Amino acid sequence: MSRSTLAPPEVAVRTGRRSFLRPDVRREVAIAIGIVLVAVAVPIIAGNSYWLQAILLATVYVIAASGLNILRAQAEQLSFGQGAVMGVAAYTTALAVAAWEYPLPVAVLLGFLAGMAAGMILALPSLRVQGYYLGFVTMAGALALPEIFFLFEEQTRAVTGVNVPPSAIRDVVFWRTEWLTLVIVAFAIAALVVAGMVKSSRFGRQLKVAGTSPEAAMTLGLRPGRLRLQAFAVASLMASVAGVLYVLLIQYVAPGSFTLALSILLYFVVVIGGAGTIVGPLLGVGILYLVPDVALASLVDYRLLIYGVTAFVIMFLMPDGIAGGLRRLLHRLRGRTAPVVTISLREVLAQAPEAGEDGNASGPDAPPGPLLRAEGLAARFGQVQALDGIDLEIGRKEIHAIVGPNGSGKTTLLNAISGLVAVDSGTVFFDGRDVSSIGASGRARLGLARTFQTPRVFADMTVWENVDCGAADGGTHWFAKALEAVREQWDRLPAATLPHGQRRFLEVARALRRGPVLIALDEPAAGLSVAERKEFSSLLRSVVAATGASVLMVEHDLELVWGTADRISVVDAGRVVVSGPPAEIRHLPEISRLFAGVNHVAG
Amino acid sequence: MDELLIILVRGLGAGAIYALIAISLNVIYNATGVLNFAQGQLLVVAGVFTYLWLPDGAGAGSPSWFLVLLLVTVVVALIAALQGWLTLLPMRSPSDQHSWIITTIAASIVLGAIMVLTIGPRVLTLDNLFGQFPLGGSQVPYVYLAVIALAVLVYLFLRWFQRRYLVGLALNALSQDLEAAKAGGIRTMPLQVLAFAIAGAIMGLTGFIGGHALGIVESQALHYVVFGFIVAVVGGLGNNTGALVAGPAFGLVLMFVSYQAGGSAEIPLALAVIVVVLMLRPEGIFGRPHARRV
């Protein structure tokens, strides 16, 4: 199949000017907005106020669910608290109007702020933990909310509920259409557009990286806990808006309106509808709320049964939700096959400026001494002394290899140096400063990059998006500018189809984009073909020559190590046994003992 | 002083029930990585069957009593096994490893809906099976002591089972490393369904013995799971020893606070406990931080 059918020419032409929405996302946002407009317009034209009210409430749920969708699909976090946040916002607005007698705009603002505050309190544990832990915490929060209303019965009127008198917002603007209808539709459109913007943005990708692989995120200079909190903030914002709109629409709140069941409904709406898609929440609200609650209202006794069974069956048939399943079906019908993807770092590296010309790490302002010095690193896990007093020095523009038998502590050493593992004792000096007390993301920001034994490639992003998902502080380096030349091309390649060897190069490109002074590689040659190993070896040399960065690698392929490294350290049982240039240590007895039977070491 | 004694007994008893829920969550979690949100509903189901099947006036020790205990345990174990099998089926496709969050909650909703359709949304009060004993001027049902004994017995049984029998050892292997167990030729699916069945049996026993202390109502199901999860996390997820200690401690604190501030304070307090524990010590009190796999 020719390339032109894959990428329409108008996409390829548009360079320089970038919109807030990726083309595919823009299409989806447009469809979603179209569905909302039609769904609201039909009952207005038909003059059916019962259905209009139901559709407007469904639209309010879509706003809350779109926020939760960002949390679930982009940040990969679980929350059963979205309904509770909505409840706090709604309840506060209602009380502010009916009990404290504030004017409506003030009440709306108070309700919004209260919702945000509740959302952030519920999200605090996300600084420390993630995943289903957060699911249960938020679930406890949603369970607690009605109880809290009853605890403060005198202030909250929990037993009777709060009636909100109708206000001017329910006046008719034009032909049967109230202001409130316009407001709800406007906020729904805004929520859908924001969801699309997050999905298209680097922020969205950072959330994804932090959610899927917190370690990888830290080595890219990101702070996963803070990103999770930000995702919760976006989700809470939409829930708070939805809560305020709920009061304006329903004009009555009681603790029973915001039980855990609402939060679970919103979560189901996101996942069943199709997490990560813009139209997903619309489809989810349709099938889980409108169908059982409104269309089948005569079967009210069986409502929960229908709802539970529907959720179960859809999860069974379409694990990616309705929108995800439909999309997969469409792709199959169109018979699209993924192109075989290759990326080349060589053409990017070829654009390197002459040595010393631009921002090379070995420039005159670099402090003297080795680039990295580790002293007496020790780490213990239960009964295992993984590191037992390691001393290590890495010079500037040096390729330093760490070899040793399995379980000797090589990867732990790499983790200790990049800050992913806390050591029990020892000091790390990096680029002339003590970084022992600085965490992984802090060290990454100082210029310490890292790749992993299994490349951390995010399958549902393009190759370019995989490269451009780190902290936003590396964009001025020449390599980052050179990468712009391949941006259009790489942005058309889905990372999912990238073969293993190419994933290694992708990870190196991502690391280099941040302009590091030291790149730590964990078994970079594992899983590479002979030809790819050769290429990788020469790539490392060009990287050092072109960027002036040093390389620290843990590697089992001794041929590659002996041919590439400037200096080799042999680690065994958590200690450095021998360290020196390959030629000097080649014939030492420690080497032959450690690698007895491996012929090419001596040769 | 007398009130304190009663709070002590009732708190420890309620805590033992939470510990049993936590242990049953751990059994499934260790074998599958799934936290079964339907576990609380299984406890309620056990209570409903006990209510329906136990003949009036069947005192502790009578043959019919024992038969019903057996029946409830087996039936709930079977329901749990079926639910587990349905939960694990879609998880075989690697595309969504988190479908269990939806499917276990959906299972809870469906079980609850069936109960509401058949017996209505009322609270069932189970007979007090064991009589009561005087304590500090009031009568305390022996049930509270019985569930504490049950928690200890279940804990000891699981320990013994996991060391003595090949099946137990295999389950233990799953908890150590699921992928390695698969690679080692263990057929994981039957074992994982067995784990669900064991967890169901624990809920069956708990519902039968402890039902009187709970009051059986469908709407409380998620409440029980969340409390069980909090105990499991405080004790260290997957660690039964931790659950056995954390459960009664948690029960005592809750009972004391709801005595002071009313029952509505229970869940907000539980929320505070889980937030504080996760902020200070995410791996739980008995869990230990393990080397991260990078």
Image (cartoon, coloured by chain):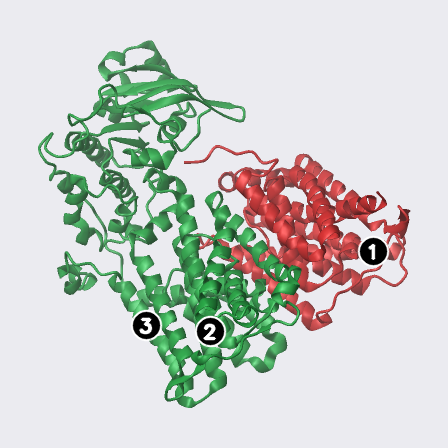
Q: On the picture, is B8 further left or further right than A500?
A: right
Quarter of the picture holding the N terminus of chain A: bottom left
Secondary structure under tag 3 reads helix
Colour chain A is painted in: green
Q: On the picture, is A418 further left or further right than A263?
A: left
Of labels 1 and 3, the one closer to you: 3
Task: Specify the subunit that label 1 lies on.
Answer: B
At 69% from the left and 37% from the top, the residue drawn is B159
At 48% from the left and 76% from the top, the residue drawn is A249
Residue hosting label 2: A58
Which percent across, then down, holds residue B106? 57, 63
Tag 1: Cα neighbours inside 10 Å, few (<14), some, or many (≥20)? few
User: What type is the residue that disc 2 sits on?
Assistant: Ala
- In this rendered view, identify the residue nearer to me: A587 or A544: A544
- Label at residue B67: 1
Colour chain B is painted in: red
Q: On the picture, is A87 further left or further right than B16?
A: left
